[in-house]
Amino acid sequence: HVLVGEEYGGEAVPGRPCWYLDPVDGTANLANGVPWTSFSLALVVDGEPVVGVVADPWRGTLVEAAAGEGAWSAGARLDLAAEPGGVHALDADPLRGRMVSTELAGHAPWPGMLPLLDALAERWCTLRIMGSGTLTVAGIALGHGVGAVIGRFGPVDHLAATLIVREAGGVVLDADGEDTLFPATGGVLAARDRPTALALHALWRAGIADAATAA
């Protein structure tokens, strides 16, 4: 096996199982006394995450998933289809009035982020930037909002979380709108269901296009 870590370095080797470890996602929060950080661990085999674990030490929350076996927290299986607040067939806009989260790229907005936030605000969405991409993505599986967009995907930070969302019944897309847990480039989108994912992806792409035009 190979280990790739936020603090340990390393890189994946084709044909060998790889563990992606981030002992503290949200280091700026930790350094500034904000109790919103996480531990993340994912096992990737043949380019696909097969095991994912995310822990929130501040609230004592542990979320785990295995490919094809579902996602679990506190001994209960996570099932977004069974949770209240899902999208109904008659909803004209699955984002209107809902909560959507994102994260900065380092300490700055990523290209297209500000137009996306403007478009979501026009839909009366509640917007959150909490400072831990791992918790932002994994939180979708726990019902913390309906969607999240991360402008710059990092496997150490996000692989465990994307697997958890998929195994909980959610949708994970790359910037091109393709279903994937491991985007080759760009960012990643997680949503509680397909209609929400498609609506959020359309705004994401429009934001990227606006940023490119303004550049």
Image (cartoon, helix red, strand yellow):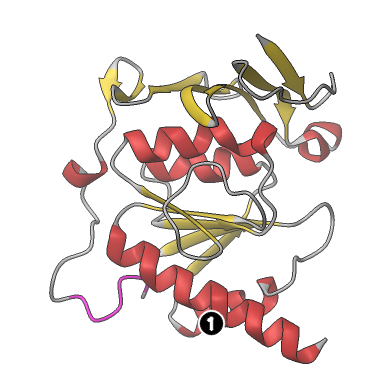
**Main SS type for the magenta part?**
loop
Residue marked by disc 1: 119
Q: Position of residue 20 (x, y in %)?
A: 66, 23
Tell me the quarter of the picture where residue 208 sits: bottom right
Q: Position of residue 164 (x, y in %)?
A: 42, 33
Near mark 1 (Cα within 10 A), the count class, few <14, some 14-19 or many ≥20, is some
Q: Is residue 95 left or right of residue 125?
A: left
- In the displayed structure, 85 sits above or below 68; it is below
Along the line of sight, the residue nearer the viewer: 119 or 99: 119
Q: Determine the residue positioned at 52% across, 18% down.
A: 60
Q: Amino acid at mark 1?
A: Ala
Q: Determine the residue positioned at 49% across, 85% down.
A: 122
* Residue lying at the far bottom of the rendered structure: 213
Q: Determine the residue positioned at 63% across, 18% down.
A: 18
Along the line of sight, the residue nearer the viewer: 11 or 106: 11
- In the displayed structure, 94 sits above or below 2; it is below
- From the image, which quarter does the C terminus lie in? bottom right
- In the displayed structure, 40 sits above or below 183; it is above
- Confirm whether residue 97 shows in the render: no
